[in-house]
Image (cartoon, grey):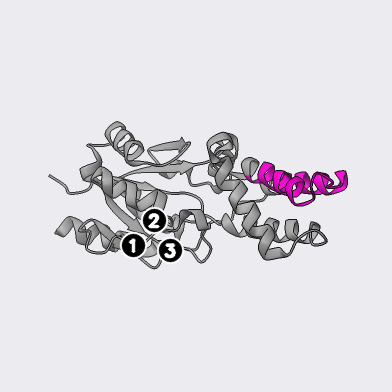
């Protein structure tokens, strides 16, 4: 019996660029409100608003845009000009229409693995935006299934790997977030593979699980076929 039959992969900042557009928009936001608060303070207030609003807005650009507006209202004591709100909304719309930039070696890696394993794209965020990204990336055909979820937890991976495979124990989850892609997948019984990205949202940071038998770290996604082969050969 094969050790691995299903490989789950994260999308944002694992298959294509994502966080860099949030950072650019955050810089624009700080510039728009520079007369009201210092940049570092604005970023702290915005991050606090994003975390506070996850339960209501979920992950993604729309929630980020609403959190920027909320923060702008807070730091100006309700006196934020309508022109600034309009520019924040325009920046959010720009993010929602930005072309997809796949990371180096992604297509080649997926094509290699798709011939031998069931690939499942597991991403969280706004349904319409994530569907747009998958379609524009041209990678959708390489996946047996696409799962767009509101959050990633042990239960999420247990459910998905049971639906699209032989259970979490014979699956692997790959992504750039220790908090969302790696740790809960390991808790579900899967291999958790961490592929760091130069830019990762602070919320997704966590400590690497030292000594965990099913944890692996790769520097690039291109190393994944070699890791899968090594695990299979035992």
Q: Position of residue 141 (x, y in %)?
A: 45, 41
Label 3 sits on residue: 196
Quadrant of the snapshot with the N terminus: top left
Classify mark 2: residues with Cα within 10 Å, few (<14), some (14-19) or many (20+): many
**Residue 176 visible from this viewpoint:** yes
Q: Position of residue 158 (x, y in %)?
A: 29, 37
Label 2 sits on residue: 178
Classify mark 1: residues with Cα within 10 Å, few (<14), some (14-19) or many (20+): some
Magenta stretch: includes residue 111 = no
Q: How far is mark 2 from mark 1, CA to CA? A: 7 Å
Of the pair 209 and 112, the residue shown nearer to us: 209
Q: Position of residue 196 (x, y in %)?
A: 43, 63
Residue 220's mark? none
What secondary structure is marked by label 1? loop
Q: Does residue 81 appear left or right of residue 223 in this picture?
A: right
Q: How far is mark 1 from mark 3, CA to CA? A: 11 Å
Is the residue under label 3 in contact with that under label 1 (CB below 8 Å)? no
Q: Looking at the image, is mark 2 or mark 3 earlier in the sequence? A: 2
Q: What is the span of residues highlighted in magenta in the rendered image?
A: 64-93
């Amino acid at each position: 019996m094969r050790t691995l039959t299903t490989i789950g992969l994260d999308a944002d900042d694992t298959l294509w660029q994502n966080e860099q557009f949030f950072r650019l928009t955050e810089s624009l936001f700080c510039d728009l409100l520079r007369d009201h608060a210092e940049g570092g303070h604005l970023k702290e207030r915005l991050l606090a608003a994003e975390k506070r609003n996850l339960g209501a807005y979920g992950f993604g650009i729309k929630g980020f845009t609403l959190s920027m507006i909320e923060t702008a209202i807070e730091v100006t004591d309700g006196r934020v000009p309508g022109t600034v709100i309009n520019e924040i909304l325009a920046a959010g719309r720009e993010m929602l229409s930005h072309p997809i930039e796949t990371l180096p070696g992604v297509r080649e890696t997926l094509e290699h693995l798709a011939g031998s394993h069931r690939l499942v794209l597991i991403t969280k965020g706004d349904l319409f935006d994530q569907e747009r990204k998958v379609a524009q990336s041209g990678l959708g055909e390489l996946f047996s299934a696409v799962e767009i979820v509101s959050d990633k937890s042990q239960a999420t991976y247990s459910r998905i790997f049971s639906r699209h495979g032989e259970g979490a124990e014979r699956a692997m989850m790959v992504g750039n977030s220790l908090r969302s892609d790696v740790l809960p997948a390991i808790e579900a019984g899967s291999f958790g593979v961490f592929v760091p990205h130069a830019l990762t949202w602070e919320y997704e940071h966590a400590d690497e699980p030292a000594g965990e038998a099913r944890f692996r770290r790769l520097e690039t996604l291109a190393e994944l076929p070699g890791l899968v082969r090594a695990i299979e050969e035992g």
